[in-house]
Amino acid sequence: MSSSRDGSAAGRGCGGLTLRGGMNGLVRCRPFDGLRANGGVGEPSPIDALTMHGGFDEPSADGAVRTTRGSRDAPRAPTSPFGLRLSKPLAARRRLPALALALAAACLAASAAHAAERFPGIGRAATPKEVAAWDIDVRPDFKGLPPGRGTVAQGQQVWEAKCAGCHGVFGESNEVFTPIVGGTTKEDVKTGRVAALRDPNYPQRTTLMKVSQLSTLWDYIRRAMPWTAPKSLTDDEVYAVTAYILHLGEVLPAEFELSERNIAQVQQLLPNRNGKTLDHAKWPGPEFGTRRKPDVQGTACMRDCATEPTIASYLPDHARNAHGNLAQQQRTVGPQRGANTAPAAPKAAAAAPATPATTPTAAASVGSLLQSNACLACHQVDGKLVGPAFREIAARYAGRDDAVGQLVTKIRQGGVGAWGTVPMPAQSIGEAEAAQIAQWLAGGAKP
């Protein structure tokens, strides 16, 4: 699309459709020749169906209706909202909606045809909704940030319901996850450098001590949290949770509301905003003004290349299952799965006689429920992980007549205090499935 000096816009769209007469900003699309709208002198097109100029209707040589511009003395025709002059007859004015619909359909068909021509026989063109579902990244300059807002108080509600189970009520986390909050001071907020990072005796590095871009924190929460249901938070909830984290770090006051309009100003309060270096020239890229050559250059070896390295160190067998079977602790999204670190089953002394296939046992059925509901992300059968071991739970409720009912309530509603300070959030599991797990626990959590 190009603009002339008098403010009109001209572009070859839909393979021959030229739009003029102050219609700047229209999207071009190429694939077919058919329509030409000028608001001025008519020009022939390869498929001469209709030319719109803004005067009076005149028949053309090929029988199509062509609206040509009258003389200066002719009465001026009415003007459309887009700057095109319309002919006086009502029939000519009624053709505009049909022309707009035809133009929209042509652009959509053109886009699909163009994609098919570039990649013949490979898939199809992605729809705008499909592209939008993947295009969710937020840049350091906050480009890509969706509109929304959330207060510290709203963030506290979301945090206690969906985040505190892993990260603690105050962001202190537990023995499994690194703390989110801690190690920053009001002086750090002023200087943009975290003094505790220079202290070798400081026990642990928290998230707020290290993160230098607020967009990183916002984007990660939106994309990866909560652990058992990533991408399930609304944009408003992400704003609220981010505001609550910053409040816990004494960056924002309790009554603050974070939104896309003020997040850039909040970036200037981040405790470690000045604690990064760009000397490596790898980040940010040219779109942020970086023009220097990175300090590390990757080259592909083409001859006399080093052989594949030999791995000489492995995790000892006795330590592989220290935190439970990693294969069972992965979320059910994405292609990556943890290694199976469960100890190998002992070999039988003698081969048992072959038996006909049987239906899955109750324990196997419960195992699939534990896996599908992400229970194994926090619990394992024999040892404590984030929460207590299933065998510990079974021992506490052994012999109780109300064990199944109590366990169903605990599973579905969550709770805190019975097994320590880390809360268990409410679980979105059906009552029948919760009862099946509860019966397994009440029976001793047997394999």
Image (tube, rainbow, N blue to C red):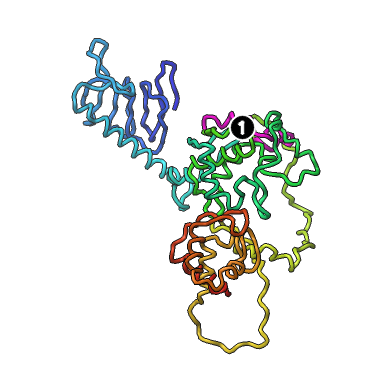
On the image, which quarter does residue 419 sit in?
Answer: bottom right
Name the one closer to the observer, 206 or 216: 206
Name the one closer to the observer, 41 or 269: 269
Q: Quadrant of the N terminus?
A: top left
Tell me the amino acid under the disc marked 1: Gln
On the image, which quarter does residue 75 sit in?
Answer: top left
Residue farthest along the top direction in this orientation: 73
Residue 415's spot in the image, x, y percent? 54, 56
The residue depicted at 21 percent of the width and 31 percent of the height is 63
Q: Residues within 10 Å of mark 1 (few under 14, many from 20)?
A: some
Residue farthest along the bottom direction in this orientation: 353
Residue 264's spot in the image, x, y percent? 58, 30
The residue depicted at 42 percent of the width and 27 percent of the height is 25
The residue depicted at 51 percent of the width and 66 percent of the height is 369
Please, is residue 194 above or below residue 172 in the view? Answer: above
The magenta stretch spans residue 274? yes
Please, is residue 93 above or below residue 299 in the view? Answer: above
The magenta-colored residue range is 260-284
Q: Could you tell me if residue 339 is visible in this image?
A: no
Name the one closer to the observer, 56 or 375: 375
Tally of numbered tags: 1
| Residue position for label 1 | 267
